[in-house]
Amino acid sequence: MFSRIIIGIGLVVTVFVIPCKGQDAYAVLQGWNRYSDARNALYHDMAEQAYDQLEERERRIAQLHSLSDWQQRQKAVKKTLMDMVGPFPGKTPLNVKITKTVKKEDYTVEDIIYESEPGFYVTSSLFIPRGLKGKAPAVIYCSGHTDKGYRDAVYQHVILNLVKKGFIVFAFDPVGQGERLQYYDKDSGRSVVGGPTHQHSYPGAQAFITGSSLARYMIWDGIRAVDYLLTRREVDPDRIGITGRSGGGTQSAYIAAFDERIHAAAPENYITSFRRLIQAIGPQDAEQNFSHEIANGIDHADLLEVRAPKPTLMITTTRDMFPIQGAMETAKEVRRIFEAYGQKDHFNRVEADTIHASAKSNRVALYAFFQKYLNNPGDSTDLDVTPLGDELRVTETGQVSTSFKDAQTVFSLNKKDAERDVRRLQDKRKDRATHLPALLQAAKEMSGYREPSLYHAPVFTGRYQKGEYVIEKYFVRGEGDYVIPYLLMIPDHANGKAVICLNPEGKSAEVSDGDMEWFIKRGYTVLAPDLLGVGESGRGDYKGDSFIDNTSYGIWHLSLLIGRSIVGIRAADVTRLVQVLAHEHHIAELYGLARGTMCTSMLYAAAFNPAIKRICLIDGLSSYRSLVMNRFYAPRSIYGAVAGALTAYDLPDLAAGLAPRKLMIVDTVNEKDPHKAKGMLQDDASLIQAAYANRSAQKALLIKHQKATERRSDLLSDWIR
């Protein structure tokens, strides 16, 4: 709703046509019903790509008929899973400590700490039935998303029922839960980044950037849990099972898929299908995603099929947030491989008519499943039990981080991976001749950038005459079934040059608060778009379970699942706008200017498209290294991140590759504070400066800090001079 806009410096001019209340004067798509849902275009576009990839998987699955066919797929899936999640760290001493033993009438509890990696302490409890004769079956219990971990009454109910039925149960706290809060504040006694899903996704994003994943850490905790059970004389190594509900269903499915020592698995309230998940609630926290998972032909069914013919039970509910239709379709597929093995009775699915919850009938089915397949027959009745309380506090302070001086977190462990990646990058940078072409190719592949193959003419939707220039409104088709709305400001006396301006708040903000009029007065044509996720192509309705600082991690996870990136898709759309300016307006020379979180999109676009002759980046992220090396970072930066990027390149490498084109960088941002970590900022700048010096183009590189008293126009003058 704009009745006025700013033209030039300090001059206010009334717009000739005042829009109706609730309208945006610069909305391009208003009145176009075909694009009435443009605000959700980013999610829908990536979802359609996921469906295409899943259809290809379905075609391959349909061609599997014989046991040999299925076994070949099992072998391929195992390799794919390991390629996506691994490599796991080498096995180191568990350094097990039993901190307390609690004796009850019919069972004993040992509170235990073990190290899945050096300093990565896992808090756990081993429940041992009294009166065991010989070796007994053991069940690993994985907890869902609750701050209490396995101490939650719902999980305690299942654990203690299994114990009373003669099973040893080993329950451990997942990362970010129970006594393993990753961002614990001892003053408040809480996590400073939020609940379990936030504690998964926040460091999970950093892990993805280094080519790892949060799932890797959580799966490894489970594999080491199996290692520990095998050291116990009470445990029968051939009768180990695993179960868990919700997030624990995720963990139990993952761990069982990776560890062949687990004989029987019963994931609860998790398994569905990616198609139905994306159609419904969307991708969830970082724990539940592998990079390139859908792109590599992996669906939930593969987590169960890779185990066949080992006993497997899907526990589902009809009104679960994880769509029951997906669970039904997955079960139908999974049955095929068990039938091929001649072991159809080793797979089953049970359901209860309830929400995402623990149902009595499902619990009874779980007990009976383990009793049958872990050879521990008995009564499967669901018993009333009394949950344990303080008896299950494992550490001295109630938190690993305050109980052990050397306690590691996902962040600190991943930081070590990042340091390794940076050292390797530094070695590669010594040979500029081979590094630059290699990093550009890697950046294209890893970001999922796709060079536009077809040209689409733009659609004109309106014009404002503004004195000595006009503002025209257009949209042009993007990569998929969406359009890119943009404004084109054309001076009466154009100089044949144009500037594409990217603003994280959208094109309307660029008109009102940006520098468009400054360029117009100097004869430049200016194009300001709303790229996917911005402005009219806005943030959309989907938030997911990890919505941190107004940023949906889930939509970024969707891009990882399909082997793309938001920044790569946006960069390709910038290339489309470059083509429009060349074809429709015969622009002779083109520049690119971006602010804030849109700087990475412009940087990628310029790195891949030499037609962008000059580049100006204002308040942009300094490097991916800064994202993963700082414990706290701005969530908004992740939309510019690429999974695995640090294994091959960093943002300063892309900037260095722009030499000898003119590049101005203003107030580079390092994590939350734009002026923090000066040493890292200087290192990033030095890399770019060295590349420009190598091309004898030192004068083409401007790295500046805008002083409070300095006008932006002075900086821009230096850039276009």
Image (cartoon, rainbow, N blue to C red):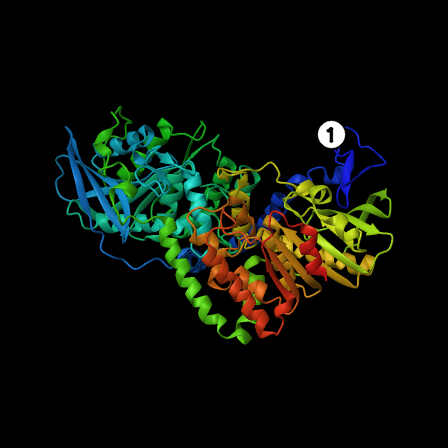
User: Which is more toward the observer, 126 or 206?
Assistant: 206
Q: What residue is shown at x 23% (from left), y 52% (from top)?
A: 94
Q: In this view, does 718 lie above or below 263?
A: below
Q: What residue is shown at x 50% (from left), y 75% (from top)?
A: 431
Callout 1 crowding tier (Cα within 10 Å): few <14, some 14–19, many ≥20: few
- Which type of secondary structure does the marked residue at label 1 adopt? loop
> Looking at the rendering, which quadrant does residue 173 occupy?
top left
The residue pinned by badge 1 equals 22
421 left or right of 60 in image = left
Residue 481 x, y percent position in the rendering: 69, 48
For the N terminus, the quadrant is: top right
Residue type at the position of mark 1: Gly
Residue 345 x, y percent position in the rendering: 36, 43
> Looking at the rendering, which quadrant does residue 71 occupy?
bottom left
For the C terminus, the quadrant is: bottom right
Please say whether residue 345 is visible from this viewpoint.
no
Residue 457 x, y percent position in the rendering: 80, 54
Q: What residue is shown at x 31% (from left), y 48% (from top)?
A: 222
Residue 394 x, y percent position in the rendering: 23, 38
Q: What residue is shown at x 27% (from left), y 30% (from top)?
A: 380
381 left or right of 564 in image = left
Please say whether residue 343 is visible from this viewpoint.
yes
